[in-house]
Image: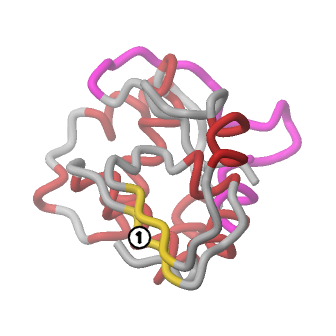
Amino acid sequence: MRSPIKWVGGKSKLSSIIVPLIPDHTCYVEVFGGAGWVLFRKEPSQVEVLNDLDGELINFFRVVQRNPRALIRSFEWSLASREEFERLYYLDSSTMNEIERAHRFYYIIMASWGGEFGSARFQTSITDYGHGNRLIGALKTARRRIKAAHG
């Protein structure tokens, strides 16, 4: 399974090498979780913890886990545009609820060149070439995988 987000320094390519090296276990902890590529690629454990210093990232995964329908609804009529990207990029997330923060974070990550949250460089990767918004499918899949994870 793939992570729902792009993340600078992520282990998307290394995860296929790392996962086979993980010994049998009942508890798995991602200390520097990031996009969680290793967590998403490995088989679920009895106990899993996804941790990261980035509060916006952790809020995003919490919302995906606990309130995915609200987050998915927030994207149903969301358009990919430079104007919307810049509007969200410059909003103060401290005034938003957790769904709004997760929406803002995910839109910016997916529409930023190379998945760099701190860089206001727009790209149109959130669309599925006219077939709809690929974010919705990615969120539903991610929710199933991290349903029981702690964070």
Residue at x-position 11% and y-position 57% = 94
Q: Crowding near pointer 1: few (<14 within 10 Å), some, many (20+)?
A: some
In reply to whether residue 2 is colored magenta, the answer given is no
| Residue span colored magenta | 118-140
State the residue in front, 146 or 32: 32
Going by the numbered disc 1, the residue's amino acid type is Val
Q: Residue furthest front?
A: 23
Q: Is residue 72 above or below residue 125?
A: below
Residue 69 falls left or right of residue 34: right
Q: Position of residue 98 (x, y in %)?
A: 29, 70
> Which percent across, then down, holds residue 1?
76, 54
- Residue 141 versus residue 21 in the image, above or below: below
Q: Residue at x 69, y 34 (%)?
A: 17
Q: Secondary structure at mark 1?
A: strand
* Left or right: residue 141 compared with residue 22: right
Vertical arrangement, residue 60 with respect to residue 69, above or below: above
- In this view of the protein, which residue sits in the foreground, 73 or 119? 119
Viewer-nearest residue: 75 or 108: 108
Task: Report the side of 91 relative to 40 (left or right).
Answer: left
Which residue is under mark 1?
49
